[in-house]
Amino acid sequence: MRGIIPRNLAVEINKRLQHNPVVAILGPRQCGKTTLAGQIIKPLKNSVYLDLENPADLAKLDDPLAFFSLHKDDLVCLDEIQRAPELFKTLRSIVDERGRNSQFLILGSAGRDLIHQSSESLAGRIAYLDLTPFLLNEIGPVSLGNFQRLWLRGGFPRSYLATDDNNSFQWRKDFIRTFLERDIGMLGFRMPPARLGRLWKMCAHIHGSMLNASKLADSLGVSSHTIRSYVDLLEHTFMIRVLMPDSPNLKKRLVKSPKIYIRDSGILQALLDIRTHDDLLSHPVIGASFEGFAMENILASARSYEPSFYRTGAGAEIDLVLRRGRQVLAFELKSSTIPSVTKGFWNALEDLSPDDVYVVAPVKEAYPIKHGVMVTPLHDIVSRLNNDY
């Protein structure tokens, strides 16, 4: 395995610590939160780290006020905070008493809606930042090999950095099994692992398509309400993305159902038993796989935008729409090195009149097509979003 890969989020975390008493880094298990936190606190003279899944560390918080008083001048890092949500009320009283920034760095493997106590107890005192698995602009020089490896293996560090594709695939299969059999229960949910696993695999098969809860419910023999609760859980643990439809003020008959994506491309490939890049190239999911892969990289660089997709009943469609105030960006995501677009794409552009339009594809360099639309490599789009918008 390679050495530690610097993460884009590190600068933003340090900035937020300067202006907030508490900073929360949220993201899926094994995405690198602990490693990143270690890089943040290592240079500090006054810092302490506790892993709340370690019984010895958790025991130190039997009397949290006493422990935090002992470390009143330190930055305290609490890893896997979802294991002890009752701490948030204590954190609030300490934060208010001390009245300084950079007091706590907390790490969690569930979204803020699952760690709801923090929003209730630390409102106005906490900054949330989401850490993803490795992104395209984090893995080093732009090359075909790096691009293909990240797309196939996904961005979880141990998967991407594995010695070969087989070891990477096996790590991801183990990750899926551990998530279902251990992690869900540790979050306090009593969902049957086998049933949740079947739903997760079904989501992989409809990756990039509309979410039809009733159809999934019929397939699993459960209610639509149960399907929605399973989907919510997978979404709040960063395993899937539910992308809502765009709703501009137009007199059009718009699609109202959301689309569903497996967030990490490597996990998608593992769920579908795709082991090599050759397997991926010959699999029917290749277009949707690239769509999700490109989308996750774009959205990680467009945190201030509201994402959606656009589709009308008449067939006008754009894969990804980003809105920020009056600014509208439109993206069509294509796996082909010679991408083409449909009539529905051009009709959607007439409906939305976006400020900038890109067809994102695995091409070597950007070039324009008619109507001012640019065919653009993914790394160029990520760079533009980080620097220009």
Image: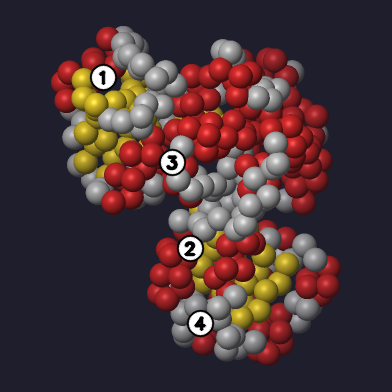
Q: Quadrant of residue 162?
A: top right
Q: Quadrant of residue 225?
A: top right
Give the residue type at disc 4. Answer: Asp
Residue 255 x %, y %: 38, 19
Task: Find the distance from the CA under tag 3 to the CA under tag 1.
Answer: 32 Å
Give the residue type at disc 1. Answer: Ala
Q: Which residue is mark 4?
A: 96
Q: In this rendering, which labeled residue sits more in front, label 1 or label 2?
A: 2
| Residue 72 appearing in the image | yes
Q: Which residue is mark 3?
A: 142
Q: Which residue is mark 2?
A: 10
- The reply to whether the C-beta atoms of the residues labelled 3 and 2 are less than 8 Å apart is no
- On the rendered structure, is 85 left or right of 142? right
Earlier residue among tags 1 and 2: 2
Give the residue type at disc 3. Answer: Val
Question: Regarding mark 1 in the picture, which secondary structure is present there?
Answer: helix
